[in-house]
Image: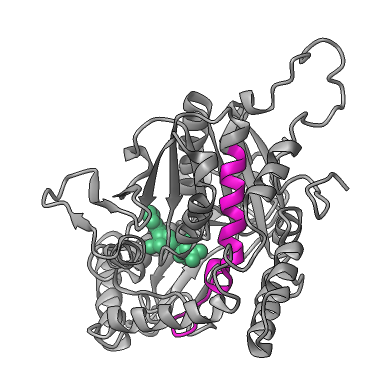
């Protein structure tokens, strides 16, 4: 595996051409901003329309059926097909509600691209290679990954690579299609089609869009999910003297146009089935949709080979109340003006690991700082800086690097978690008495410490 990683390091020119021109990070951000302005210019002001429509919808629902779970609230607010936050907004970037690592620096996506190729090579270079991303946002991460694939075209030659994107938002899928294919894509006329949009990327690869993971064709796949799981609906539970009770959303009895949290007096189906018997915390958030998604990926990987890399803010089963909203890069009350702000909760990686089961081998979670350093981000920054004559661009490169890796910024809050097929780590002598505490025989890029030239440090 180390040889594979070294080879990748050698194959990728360590010159400004790999990172495009020095300073591209800043230039590309400007391009994205103007694209986004064009895409959103026709949208109505979000408070005037979306907030009121969504609040009306939620209050009628609660009046009809009683308080709703936080999971149902989150699902409606984020992905309601008419007025959901993700369905109506392009929320990413400096003009939006939040910014993500792939939008901050292209180095991020490029290192993940190396990870994908490295895992494909470690799996014995299967002839068919499906690159899958869940929740691709503006398509920035997958674009950066595909640029690495283009740079490594000799390594990938003879391999049939295809791109598969799982995206619930028609608005964002349009932005992704524009960024990846220019105009070379079509929307399906069949409303029930599993592939709702298809096209050809700028580098000539077939790309398809789906609403659900289960619609992706079977076959060797590398799955990427960056800030996807934190957007999936969570249930919230509170320990009380009478046992666990679920937190629900109700209409505020004192102000009929406001919502409030309530505790249901009796156990719900969710509180009966989603909590661990030995749970120690007083307040717990569980994301069953995330669990089911991880199970699907785990089954796919076990059956057809491949790997999944999940990156998100999260914890290993220790945090309690992490549900929060973001609007205009500021914290926002989760129950106020629903549909106008992003809703999110930290990912519980211990839960994902449990749901992945024994069918795959799990790595992590490790911090983003650790993962990116293991992937060689320090070396790449140095190469960029050496090739960059312009002081302001150098400052931007350093700032982006700092945001991604500084423990006080995104370096420690964000974590990386991987699932691999058991076959990927099989040793010839496995099970013959020497396996006791030996580490995996083939290092997994990013989860194993590497020196600057790909050596174990
Ligand atoms: C927080 S954004 C992250 C975007 C991107 N991965 C990034 O890091 O810049 C979440 C993405 O997941 C998509 N998404 C949210 N819920 C989804 C669901 N249930 N199914 C498919 N896509 C979903 C959103 O539309 C958006 O593209």
Residue 16 colored magenta?
no
- Residue 157's spot in the image, x, y percent? 47, 38
Location of residue 408 with respect to 160 vertically, above or below: below
User: Against 262, is 418 above or below?
Assistant: above
Tell me if 280 is positioned left or right of 79 in this view: right
Residue 297 location in percent, x, y?
A: 49, 37
In percent of the image, x 47 and y 26: which residue is there?
Answer: 304
Q: Main secondary structure of the magenta part?
A: helix
Residues in magenta, as a range: 94-119
Quarter placement of the N terminus: top right
Which of 104/25 is in front?
A: 25
Q: Does residue 285 sit above or below 305 in this rendering?
A: below
Question: Was residue 108 drawn as part of the magenta stretch in this picture?
Answer: yes
Judged from the image, the quadrant occupied by ligand 1 is: bottom left
Residue shown at 78%/12% (left/top)?
A: 431
* Residue occupying the point 29% across, 52% down: 200
- Report the coloring of the rendering: one colour
| Left or right of residue 107: residue 367 | right
Residue 393 rendering spot, x and y as whole percentages: 63, 84
Percent position of residue 82, x then y: 22, 67
- Toward the viewer: 303 or 8? 8
Q: Could one spot residue 409 in this view of the protein?
A: no
Residue 62 placement, left or right of 102 = left
Outermost residue toward the left in this view: 189
Q: In the picture shown, does residue 360 fall above or below 264?
A: above
Is residue 131 at all visible to an observer of this figure? yes
């Amino acid at each position: 595996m180390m040889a594979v990683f070294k080879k990748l390091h050698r194959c990728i020119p360590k010159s400004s051409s790999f990172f495009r021109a020095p300073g591209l990070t800043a230039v590309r951000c400007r391009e994205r901003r103007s694209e986004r302005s064009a895409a959103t210019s026709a949208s109505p002001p979000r408070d005037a329309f979306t907030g009121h429509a969504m609040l009306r919808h939620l209050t009628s629902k609660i009046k009809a059926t009683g308080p709703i779970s936080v999971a149902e609230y989150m699902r409606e607010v984020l992905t309601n097909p008419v007025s959901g936050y993700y369905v109506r907004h392009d929320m990413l970037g400096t003009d939006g509600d939040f910014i993500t690592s792939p939008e901050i620096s292209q180095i991020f996506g490029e290192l993940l691209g190396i990870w994908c190729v490295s895992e494909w090579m470690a799996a014995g270079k299967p002839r068919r290679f499906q690159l899958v991303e869940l929740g691709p946002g503006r398509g920035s991460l997958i674009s950066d990954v595909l640029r690495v694939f283009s740079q490594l075209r000799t390594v990938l030659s003879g391999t049939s690579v295809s791109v598969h994107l799982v995206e619930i938002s028609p608005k964002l899928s349009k932005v992704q299609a524009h960024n990846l294919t220019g105009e070379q894509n079509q929307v399906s006329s069949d409303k029930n089609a599993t592939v709702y949009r298809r096209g050809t990327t700028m580098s000539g690869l077939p790309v398809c869009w789906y609403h659900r993971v289960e619609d992706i064709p079977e076959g060797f796949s590398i799955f990427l999910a960056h800030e996807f799981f934190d957007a999936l609906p969570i249930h919230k539970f509170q320990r009380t003297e009478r046992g666990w009770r679920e937190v629900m959303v109700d209409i505020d009895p004192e102000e009929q146009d406001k919502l409030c949290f309530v505790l249901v007096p009796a156990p719900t189906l969710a509180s009966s089935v989603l909590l661990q018997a030995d749970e120690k915390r007083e307040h717990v958030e569980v994301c069953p949709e995330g669990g089911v998604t991880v199970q699907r990926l785990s089954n796919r990987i076990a059956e057809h080979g491949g790997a999944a890399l999940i990156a998100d803010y999260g914890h290993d089963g220790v945090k309690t109340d992490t549900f929060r909203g973001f609007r205009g890069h500021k914290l926002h009350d989760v129950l106020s003006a629903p549909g106008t702000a992003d809703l999110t909760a930290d990912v519980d990686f211990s839960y994902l690991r449990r749901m992945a089961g024994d069918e795959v081998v799990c790595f992590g979670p490790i911090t983003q700082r650790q993962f990116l350093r293991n992937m060689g981000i320090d070396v790449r920054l140095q190469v960029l800086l050496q090739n960059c004559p312009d002081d302001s661009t150098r400052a931007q490169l350093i700032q982006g690097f700092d945001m991604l890796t500084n423990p006080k910024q995104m370096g420690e809050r964000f974590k990386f978690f991987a699932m691999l097929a058991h076959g990927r780590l099989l040793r010839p002598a496995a099970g013959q008495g020497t396996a006791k505490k030996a580490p995996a025989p083939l290092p997994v890029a990013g989860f194993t410490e590497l020196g600057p030239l790909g050596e174990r440090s």
